[in-house]
Image (spheres, rainbow, N blue to C red):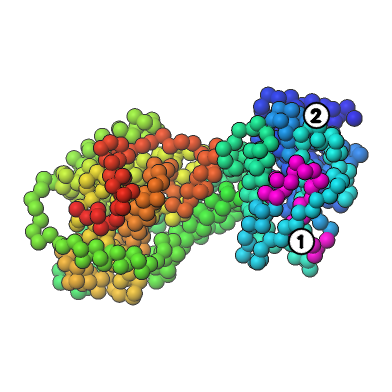
C-alpha cells in the first residue's frame, strides 16, 4: 500500500474514532463525506471513461458517500476497506452499497446484485422501496433482484471484499446497477425534471434500506429512517436561503395591496347611497418587481443536491414570483387571476359551510352596550402579551406601533400594527391578542429561531394554516363570538361572489340584503375582498379553521403547527428536518396552549365542529 494512501486512511480513521464529521478530498478528484460515523457507505467508483451525472450525485443526498476513481495511480479500494472494517468493529456490522451505470440501455432500470444470504433482507427492502418510486413520466419503476455466488462489482473494477473477508467482519455488500432511463438517447443529455424526481425518490428508498440494515444488523441508534439523512448542508443552501429572505423582505405584500384611504372611500360610498363603486388608493410601489424576479431566477437552486431543501426553495421562489406578478398587476384584471393561483379558489364544501353559518347565526337586532377600549389601551395590553413571549425567548421585540396609515390590526414582520382609530370591546381584546400575538407574532419568532430564514419569512401558502390556528386561539380563549364567525363566513361568500364576476356594489348588496350586515360592516368585508383588484386571501380564515379542526380530531399535536410560518402539508417535511437535526424545538408556547384554555382541545377531539364553536 502506497504511503500516501496510508496517510489518508490514518487521517480518516482518526476523525471517525473521534466522532467528527468527515469531508475529505481523495486522490484524483475523489470525495468522501460522512456527517458522522455510521455503519454504511454509498460508493460510486468513477469508471475509467468518466463519471455519470446522475450516479455521481446520488450519494450526495446521504449522510455517508464516497465518489472517486479507483486506479493504480489513485487506489481507493484500500480506503473503503479500512472504513468498512473500522465501522463494522464499532457498530457490529457494516453495509457497502455500490452503484454503477449499466452499459445496457434497454435493461431493467434497477438491478440489485447480492451474493450473501445476510444481505437478502436488506436487498429485498431496497427492491420494495425502489418499486414504490412514482414518476409522472412512467408507469412504474422496474427493479430486479439477482442472487449470485460471486461477489459483484462494476465490470471495470475488482470486488471490494471477497466473501470470506466480508463474512468475518460482518460486512454486507449490495451492488446496484442503474440503467440510464433519465438520459435522452438521441442527444445524450439528461431530462432535468425527470432526473430531479428520480433523485428524490431514490434518496428516500436508500435511507429506508439503510435503516432496515441499521435496525436489524447493528448497534447504531436511530428511531426513524429520516434520522439517517444528512445533517450538514452545503454553503450554497444558506446563501440561497439568505437571498430568498432578502428578496421577500424588500416588499410588504399586504401593506402594498391594502387601501390607505378606506375611511374616505367609505364616506364617499355612503354619500352615493351605496351605488357607486369606491375608488381605493394605495401606497407607492417601492420596488421594481421585474428586477427582483430576475434576481430570483438567478439563484442556483438547481445546484442543491438535497431534494427536500431544493423543493422548499423552488416552492418559495414560485410564491414570491406570483406575489411580484400581483404587485405589477395591482388594480388590473390579471391581479385576480394571480390571487387565485396564490391563495386558491373556493371549494363547494367551504362555500356551503359558510352559507350554513350565515343562516345558523342570526344578526344581533340590537348590539349590547359593552365597554370599549381604544388603540392605545389595546397596545398596552399587547405589550403584556409580548412580554410573556419575551420571557421565553429574548429575541422577541415588545414594540407595538399605533399608526394612522393602517386599518384595524395587523402583524407585519413580527411587529403588531394598530390603527389609531381602532376600538374593540374589552371582553374580546384578550382573544384577539391570542390571534395576533399568540399566533402571528409567536410563529414569526419560532421561525426566526430556526436555521432557515424561510420559516419566519413564511413558506408558500402559510396564511391558511396561520389564520386557522389564529381563529382557533380566539375560540379557545372564549372570544370567538357568533358575530365574528359570521364575518369569517361572509368573507368566503364575498370572495365567491367576486369570482363569479360581480362588482363591489353587487357584493355589498348581497351582504346587506341577504345576510343582514350593516352597511359599514358590509363595506369593510367587500373592501378587503376587492382590494388590489381582487384578493381571495380572506377565504383562508374559515378554510384554515376547518382544516385545523380535522387535524385536532385526528389526535395530532397542535403545538407542531407553531414551529414557524408553515402550511399543513409541510408537516412531513418539518418532521424530516427535525429528525435530521436541521430544525430546532420551538422556543415559544403561547398562552392559549396553556391551562385553562388548552382544555378546549379535548372538546374538539371528542367530535368538535365549526358549528359547535358558535357561541
Q: Does residue 611 lie above or below 306 as drawn? A: below
* Residue 330 appears left or right of 190: left
Q: Are marks 1 and 2 in contact (CB under 8 Å)?
A: no
* Residue 193 appears left or right of 114: left
- Residue 108's disc number: 1
Q: Residue furthest front?
A: 117
Q: Where is residue 454 in the image (x, y as percent from the top left)?
A: 49, 46
Q: Where is residue 262 in the image (x, y as percent from the top left)?
A: 24, 59
Image-quadrant location for residue 582 = top right
Spatial distance from mark 1 to mark 2, Cα to Cα? 37 Å
Which residue, given by chain and number where applicable, does mark 2 sit on? 9
Q: Quadrant of the N terminus?
A: top right
For label 1, count other residues whose C-alpha is less than 10 Å away and answer few (under 14), some (14-19) or many (20+): some
Name the residue located 65 percent from the left edge and 66 percent from the top edge. Answer: 139
Q: Read off the magenta span.
A: 104-126
Name the residue located 79 percent from the left edge and 32 percent from the top edge. Answer: 169
Amino acid at each position: 500500500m502506497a504511503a500516501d494512501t496510508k496517510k489518508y486512511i490514518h487521517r480518516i480513521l482518526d476523525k471517525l474514532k473521534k466522532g467528527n464529521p468527515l469531508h475529505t478530498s481523495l486522490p484524483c478528484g475523489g470525495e468522501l463525506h460522512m456527517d458522522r460515523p455510521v455503519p454504511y457507505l454509498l460508493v460510486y467508483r468513477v469508471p475509467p471513461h468518466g463519471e455519470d451525472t446522475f450516479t455521481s450525485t446520488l450519494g450526495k443526498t446521504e449522510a455517508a458517500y464516497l465518489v472517486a476513481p479507483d486506479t493504480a495511480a489513485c487506489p481507493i479500494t484500500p480506503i473503503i476497506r479500512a472504513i468498512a472494517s473500522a465501522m463494522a468493529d464499532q457498530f457490529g456490522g457494516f453495509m457497502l452499497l455500490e452503484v454503477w451505470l449499466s452499459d445496457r440501455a434497454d435493461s431493467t432500470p434497477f438491478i440489485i446484485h447480492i451474493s450473501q444470504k445476510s444481505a437478502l433482507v436488506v436487498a429485498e427492502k431496497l427492491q420494495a422501496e425502489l418499486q414504490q418510486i412514482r414518476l409522472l413520466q412512467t408507469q412504474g419503476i422496474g427493479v430486479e433482484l439477482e442472487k449470485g455466488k460471486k461477489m459483484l462489482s462494476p465490470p471495470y473494477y475488482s470486488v471490494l471484499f471477497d466473501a470470506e473477508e466480508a463474512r468475518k467482519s460482518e460486512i454486507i455488500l449490495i451492488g446496484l446497477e442503474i440503467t440510464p432511463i433519465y438520459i435522452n438517447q438521441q442527444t445524450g443529455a439528461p431530462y432535468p425534471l425527470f432526473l430531479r424526481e428520480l433523485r428524490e425518490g431514490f434518496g428516500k428508498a436508500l435511507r429506508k434500506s439503510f435503516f432496515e440494515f441499521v435496525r436489524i444488523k447493528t448497534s447504531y441508534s436511530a428511531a426513524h429512517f429520516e434520522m439517517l439523512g444528512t445533517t450538514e448542508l452545503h454553503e450554497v443552501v444558506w446563501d440561497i436561503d439568505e437571498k430568498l429572505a432578502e428578496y421577500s423582505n424588500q416588499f410588504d405584500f399586504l401593506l402594498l395591496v391594502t387601501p390607505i384611504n378606506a375611511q374616505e372611500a367609505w364616506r364617499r360610498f355612503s354619500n352615493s347611497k351605496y351605488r357607486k363603486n369606491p375608488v381605493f388608493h394605495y401606497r407607492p410601489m417601492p420596488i421594481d418587481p421585474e428586477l427582483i424576479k430576475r434576481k430570483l431566477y438567478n439563484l442556483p437552486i438547481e445546484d442543491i443536491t438535497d431534494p427536500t431543501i431544493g423543493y422548499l426553495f423552488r416552492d418559495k421562489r414560485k410564491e414570491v414570483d406570483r406575489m411580484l406578478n400581483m404587485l405589477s398587476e395591482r388594480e388590473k384584471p390579471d391581479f385576480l387571476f394571480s390571487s387565485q393561483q396564490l391563495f386558491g379558489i373556493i371549494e363547494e364544501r367551504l362555500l356551503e359551510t359558510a352559507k350554513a353559518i350565515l343562516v345558523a347565526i342570526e344578526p344581533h337586532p340590537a348590539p349590547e352596550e359593552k365597554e370599549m377600549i381604544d388603540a392605545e389601551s389595546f397596545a398596552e395590553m399587547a405589550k403584556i402579551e409580548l412580554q410573556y413571549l419575551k420571557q421565553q425567548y429574548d429575541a422577541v421585540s415588545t414594540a407595538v406601533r399605533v399608526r394612522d396609515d393602517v386599518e384595524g390590526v395587523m402583524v407585519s414582520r413580527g411587529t403588531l400594527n394598530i390603527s389609531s382609530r381602532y376600538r374593540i370591546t374589552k371582553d374580546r381584546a384578550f382573544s384577539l391578542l391570542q390571534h395576533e400575538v399568540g399566533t402571528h407574532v409567536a410563529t414569526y419568532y419560532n421561525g426566526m429561531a430556526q436555521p432557515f430564514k424561510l420559516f419566519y419569512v413564511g413558506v408558500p401558502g402559510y396564511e391558511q394554516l396561520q389564520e386557522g390556528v389564529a381563529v382557533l386561539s380566539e375560540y379557545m380563549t372564549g372570544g370567538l363570538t357568533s358575530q365574528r364567525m359570521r364575518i369569517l363566513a361572509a368573507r368566503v361568500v364575498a370572495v365567491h361572489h367576486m369570482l363569479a364576476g360581480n362588482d363591489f356594489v353587487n357584493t355589498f348588496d348581497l351582504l346587506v340584503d341577504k345576510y343582514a350586515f350593516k352597511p359599514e360592516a358590509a363595506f369593510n368585508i367587500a373592501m378587503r375582498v376587492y382590494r388590489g383588484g381582487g384578493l381571495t386571501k380572506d377565504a383562508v380564515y374559515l378554510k384554515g379553521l376547518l382544516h385545523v379542526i380535522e387535524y385536532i380530531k385526528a389526535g395530532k399535536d397542535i403545538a407542531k403547527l407553531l414551529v414557524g410560518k408553515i402550511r399543513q402539508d409541510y408537516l412531513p417535511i418539518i418532521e424530516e428536518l427535525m429528525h435530521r437535526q436541521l430544525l430546532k424545538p420551538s422556543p415559544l408556547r403561547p398562552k392559549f396552549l396553556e391551562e385553562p384554555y388548552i382544555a378546549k382541545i379535548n372538546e374538539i377531539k371528542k367530535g368538535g365542529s365549526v358549528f359547535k364553536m358558535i357561541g
